[in-house]
Image: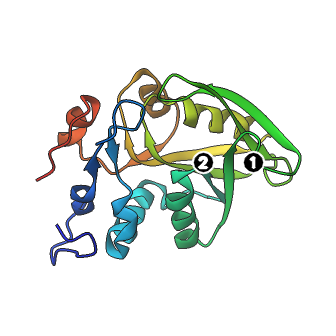
């Protein structure tokens, strides 16, 4: 498939066929959705699909998670006409921050940080990341939002796997992802055959 082409019939989720499998081994994610961002129609349709459940919700700010969540999150913020807040890996912000430890999808202990001067009590935040595998990274972002008194209105990602952490997010927060129900089991078993 030509990465920059789009079919004339752009049915929901058509852009998932742009995702490519890992070719570098177990220290990398098993699937790469980043080609979706290279295609303007794919990116626009992905963002539109992610926002469907939130059309009637008040969203004051969009938060994106370092690093691939920046691309999707900033795109969501632009469509909504809202600001964008970066949730960074520790040590990257040169201002006062709130920190949260977490374990990422590889099992590594890490720390996430967010600046202190944006999130306020009562603020409604939509959190966006590229992929939720174990849920540890997103849970850390949720904890940061809530520790500063803001509210998580929802969570959006290209995919949310049905791991323990992914299920916790789905059970406790409004969520949106692009994987149709009939393909969820493939994603959970870490293979993907989109037709």
Q: Residue at 44% across / 48% down in the picture? A: 157
From the top left corner, tell me how far across and down residue 48 is, in percent: 40, 66
Farthest-out residue, right: 96
From the top left corner, tell me how far across and down residue 27 is, in percent: 42, 32
Q: Is residue 82 above or below residue 50?
A: below
The image's mark for residue 108 is: none
The image's mark for residue 66 is: 2
Residue 75 visible within the image: yes
Q: Residue at 26% across / 69% down in the picture? A: 3
Q: Mark 2, residues whose alpha carbon is within 10 Å: few (<14), some, or many (≥20)? A: some
Residue 56 visible within the image: no
Residues 187 and 33: in front is: 33
Q: Is residue 127 above or below residue 138?
A: below
Q: Residue at 49% across / 59% down in the picture? A: 72
From the top left corner, tell me how far across and down residue 153 is, in percent: 59, 47
From the top left corner, tell me how far across and down residue 17 is, in percent: 21, 57
Q: Earlier in the sequence, mark 2 or mark 1?
A: 2
Residue under pointer 1: 92
Farthest-out residue, left: 195
Asked if residue 41 lies left or right of residue 90, the reply is: left
Marks 2, 1: nearer the viewer: 1
Q: Is residue 117 above or below residue 160?
A: below
Q: Secondary structure at mark 1?
A: loop
């Amino acid at each position: 498939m030509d990465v920059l082409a789009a079919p004339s019939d752009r049915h929901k989720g058509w852009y998932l066929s742009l995702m490519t499998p890992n070719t570098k081994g177990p220290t990398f994610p098993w699937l790469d959705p980043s080609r979706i961002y290279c295609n303007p129609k794919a990116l626009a349709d992905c963002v539109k699909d992610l926002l469907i459940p939130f059309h009637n919700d008040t969203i004051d700010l969009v938060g994106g998670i370092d690093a691939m969540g920046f691309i999707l999150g900033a795109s969501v913020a632009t469509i909504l006409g809202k600001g964008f807040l970066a949730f960074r890996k520790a040590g990257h912000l040169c201002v006062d921050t709130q920190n949260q430890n977490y374990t990422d999808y590889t099992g590594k202990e890490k720390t996430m940080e967010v600046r202190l001067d944006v999130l306020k009590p009562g603020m409604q935040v939509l959190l966006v990341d590229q992929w939720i595998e174990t849920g540890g990274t997103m849970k850390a972002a949720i904890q940061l939002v809530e520790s500063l008194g803001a509210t998580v209105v929802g969570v959006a990602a290209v995919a949310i796997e049905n791991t323990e952490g992914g299920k916790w997010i789905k059970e406790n927060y409004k969520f949106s992802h692009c994987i149709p129900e009939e393909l969820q089991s493939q994603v959970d078993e870490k293979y993907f055959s989109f037709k």
